């Protein structure tokens, strides 16, 4: 325990004098409700730890009387170490941890009040899914039509909102599980109680039940917790919000630290409204704004502030810095994703030559599939990189699965690939059947596919297994023939669709599923760069052989969501295009709220940069296997002219430039104003001009049937049909392709 008497004599200057006025105010405002709006890079962690130390020293309270809540174990550990450093000794007995850790600690003390024993088990996600699957089978609900993950997702969302089955009506689950989701929720909770178990959502929900049903227990914690301190308040869900609010009603000495402009986790239950209504929930609350930024230059801060100011759902603050303006944010318009990757790599190499360490460079993407072009470019030029927060593109589960299907189709004797996907999606070919195949393969001295081909013609396998295996082998044989007749970019989607693999992820309701489907589409895009599937398979094998051994000397590649809390000297922000960023799914699913969260995500991306920020957007992007004219993100238009410098080839975009010499498009007709509504672009469409070539700016005439043309990827060909700006061309080598007319030039103009 802290010896407060020995520490009390420490002069205030030892830990308060280095704080700026706003930080010191946040540290010393100990009584009553306090909301600390801590902007990006304003020293939030320093304020949190100093406030805890000051609380223990100045109020002479027992550490057990303080409840300090974080979102991650890492943040809790960092806070613990920093407070110990300020006090000169370790603090024992205090309540510092994550929501789940603290709620579990309370629940173990009072488990019997919700029908559990104190030694209850906390189930992980695999155990939860196994239990849901059992309940679906018992209820005779098709788990192919309603995958366990989808049902569990609904239950988890209910728990995030603090809901128990008794608070739900029968129809609240909609069509999920044939309208029986609430019934399954009831059965799930009953089964958990039988197992003396709970899941992570239960930890908080059971706490709420205990506090509401047993006022004497709540009064005990009201007496104990005289001071509450909460980190990242903008990321709380409803259940966490209710838990904090009910505990704070005792002494009302609650301090919440957060940034409404960095609330970016709505897709996993976070409610930005929790921080926005703090003053309503706690009348008389003191709001302290930390606005002095110690991270970024003036231009970066101004650009980020102007961007996020377009959101209406915010409390408002203005970041400033004593640092100089630095370099303006650089906005680059490029031709396509490959061009974008080349430009980024060129800029990184230039930074490296000027003495910048690779570890101080990051590429932050909106969607995981965007990493593929950068990874391949970096591998080609030998630039060290690492993907943070997830595997490299070709190491992702869905990519490995898809490649396994292709490998078995092309090379039937690939036993490792065959084993990976033989029961994916589930076909009823379990471990016992696979062992039987393996034994037969050894006996016959052949591969598992070879053994299967023999066994399906005998009576050694059970009839149902034999029929399933025969159908799968016939599929592989048919796909193998298709590779001889059709382009591989058409056959691979066929394999993924007909095998049921695509449908498996379409029916998966987890937050990761849409990203996995995007990655599968990007895989097909990657194949288009190769003449044959064998060349692509060899390419992937070489990519997978690349071993990262650069330690910290590597460029960091990650998603914008994964970058929160990090900072780098140089940050690249590619793919700022409508539909990609802001993400169309977010707009379709949440409307204005989705748009504002996407804008906050852009703000987070910009404020990760200390010295330089680079924004890029492409005129064309391959989506779903087809080239699409891309429109610059509305966020590009919202960056202030005085804080950016734009760089694009003349004529790259046909939209008005709003005074920019480089021609980067700005929105006019249908522009979204500060009401945050969805854009309905009528006239200002950012499409490539039809009077230029893929190599920028070369004038060409309208195209006609029979004309010879040249394409930078597919080579020379003859136009077969014309449909608006779409040309159907018979290429001499690449075969028949449909392309956008702006991607080709007359053959006599090719150079």
Image (spheres, helix red, strand yellow):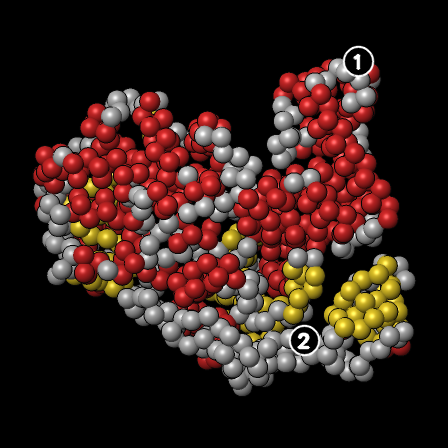
Q: Who is closer to the viewer here, 153 or 409?
A: 153
- Residue 257 appearing in the image: yes
In this view of the protein, which residue sits in the foreground, 104 or 587?
587
* Quadrant of image for the C terminus: bottom right
- Point 53% across, 34% down: residue: 142
| 407 relative to 354, above or below | above
Q: Position of residue 566 (x, y in %)?
A: 43, 53
Q: Secondary structure at mark 2?
A: loop
Above or below, 739 relative to 160: below
Work out how far the residue at label 2 is from the one at label 1, CA to CA, in angstroms: 62 Å
Q: Quadrant of the N terminus?
A: top left
- Mark 2 in CB contact with mark 1 (< 8 angstroms): no
Pick whichever, 711 or 641, lies toward us. 711
**Which corner quadrant of the image does residue 577 belong to?**
bottom right
**Which label is found at residue 688?**
2
Q: Is residue 301 visible?
A: no
In the rendered image, residue 673, in percent from the top left (x then y), is placed at: 42, 77
Q: Position of residue 150 (x, y in %)?
A: 48, 41
Q: Is residue 353 left or right of residue 200?
A: right
Instruction: Examine the image and state in which quarter residue 165 appears.
Output: top left
Label 2 or label 1, whichever lies nearer to me, is 1
Q: Residue at x 80, y 73 (%)?
A: 722
Location of mark 1 (residue): 443
Question: What residue appears at the point 73 percent right and 79 percent down from the top-left corner?
Answer: 690
Identity of the residue drawn at 63% across and 27% down: 428
Judged left or right of residue 638, residue 208 is left
Foreground residue among 157 and 5: 157
Extreme residue toward the bottom, this view: 659
């Amino acid at each position: 325990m802290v010896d407060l008497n020995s520490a009390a004599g420490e002069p205030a200057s030892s830990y308060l004098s280095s704080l700026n006025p706003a930080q010191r105010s946040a540290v010393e405002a100990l009584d009553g409700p306090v909301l600390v709006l801590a902007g990006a890079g304003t020293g939030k962690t320093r304020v949190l730890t100093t406030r805890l130390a000051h609380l223990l020293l100045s109020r002479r309270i027992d550490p057990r009387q303080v409840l300090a809540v974080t979102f991650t174990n890492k943040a809790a550990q960092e806070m613990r170490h920093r407070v110990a450093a300020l006090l000169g000794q370790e603090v024992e007995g205090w309540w510092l941890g994550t929501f789940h850790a603290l709620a579990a600690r309370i629940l173990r003390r009072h488990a019997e009040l919700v029908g559990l024993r104190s030694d209850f088990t906390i189930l992980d996600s695999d155990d939860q899914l196994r239990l849901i699957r059992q309940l679906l089978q018992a209820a005779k609900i098709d788990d192919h039509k309603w995958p366990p993950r989808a049902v569990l997702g609904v239950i988890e969302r209910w728990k995030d909102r603090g809901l128990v089955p008794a608070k739900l009506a029968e129809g609240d689950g909609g069509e999920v599980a044939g309208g029986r989701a609430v019934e399954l929720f009831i059965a799930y909770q009953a089964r958990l109680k039988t197992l003396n178990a709970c899941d992570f959502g239960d930890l908080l929900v059971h706490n709420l039940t205990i506090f509401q049903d047993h006022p004497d227990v709540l009064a005990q914690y009201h007496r104990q917790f005289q001071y509450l301190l909460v980190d990242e308040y903008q990321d709380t869900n409803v259940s966490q919000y209710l838990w904090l609010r009910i505990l704070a009603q005792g002494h009302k000495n609650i301090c919440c630290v957060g940034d409404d402009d960095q609330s970016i986790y709505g897709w996993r239950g976070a409610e930005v409204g929790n921080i926005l209504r703090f003053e309503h929930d706690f009348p008389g609350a003191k709001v302290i704004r930390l606005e002095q930024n110690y991270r970024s230059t003036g231009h970066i801060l101004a650009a980020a502030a102007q961007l996020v100011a377009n959101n209406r759902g915010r409390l408002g603050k203005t970041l400033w810095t004593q640092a100089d303006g630095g370099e303006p944010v650089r906005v680059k318009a490029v031709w396509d994703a490959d061009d974008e990757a080349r430009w980024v790599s060129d800029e990184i190499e230039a930074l490296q030559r000027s003495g910048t360490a690779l570890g101080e460079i990051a590429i932050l993407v909106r969607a995981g599939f965007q990493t593929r072009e950068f990874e391949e470019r970096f591998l080609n030029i030998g630039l060290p990189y690492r993907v943070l927060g997830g595997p490299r593109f070709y190491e992702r589960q869905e990519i490995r699965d898809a490649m396994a299907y292709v490998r078995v189709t092309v090379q039937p004797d690939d036993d490792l690939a065959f084993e990976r996907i033989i029961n994916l999606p589930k076909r009823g070919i379990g471990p016992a059947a696979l062992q039987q195949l393996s034994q037969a393969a050894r006996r016959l001295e052949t591969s598992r596919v070879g053994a299967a081909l023999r066994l399906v013609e005998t009576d050694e396998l059970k009839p149902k297994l034999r029929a399933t295996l025969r159908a799968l082998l016939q599929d592989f044989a048919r796909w193998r023939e298709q590779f001889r007749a059709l382009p591989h970019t058409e056959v691979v989607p066929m394999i993924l669709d007909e095998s049921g693999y695509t449908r498996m992820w379409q029916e998966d309701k987890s937050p990761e599923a849409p990203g996995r489907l995007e990655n599968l589409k990007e895989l097909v895009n990657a194949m288009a760069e190769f003449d044959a599937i064998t060349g692509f398979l060899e390419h992937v094998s070489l990519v997978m052989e690349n071993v990262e051994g650069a330690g910290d000397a590597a460029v960091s590649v990650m998603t914008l969501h994964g970058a929160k809390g990090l900072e780098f000297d140089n940050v690249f922000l590619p793919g700022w295009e409508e539909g990609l960023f802001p993400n169309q799914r977010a707009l379709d699913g949440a409307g204005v709220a989705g748009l504002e969260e996407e804008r906050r995500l852009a703000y987070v991306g910009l404020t990760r940069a200390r010295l330089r920020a680079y924004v890029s957007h492409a005129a064309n992007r391959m989506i779903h296997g087809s080239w699409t004219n891309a429109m610059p993100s509305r966020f590009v238009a919202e960056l202030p002219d005085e804080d950016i410098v734009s760089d694009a080839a003349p004529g790259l975009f046909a939209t008005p430039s709003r005074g920019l010499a480089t021609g980067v498009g700005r929105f006019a007709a249908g522009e979204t104003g500060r009401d945050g509504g969805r854009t309905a672009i009528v006239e200002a469409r950012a499409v490539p001009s039809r009077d230029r070539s893929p190599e920028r700016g070369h004038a060409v005439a309208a195209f006609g049937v029979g004309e010879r043309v040249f394409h930078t990827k597919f080579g020379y060909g003859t136009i077969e049909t014309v449909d608006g700006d779409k040309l159907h061309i018979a290429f001499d080598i690449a075969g028949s392709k449909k392309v956008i007319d702006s991607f080709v030039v007359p053959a006599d103009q090719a150079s």
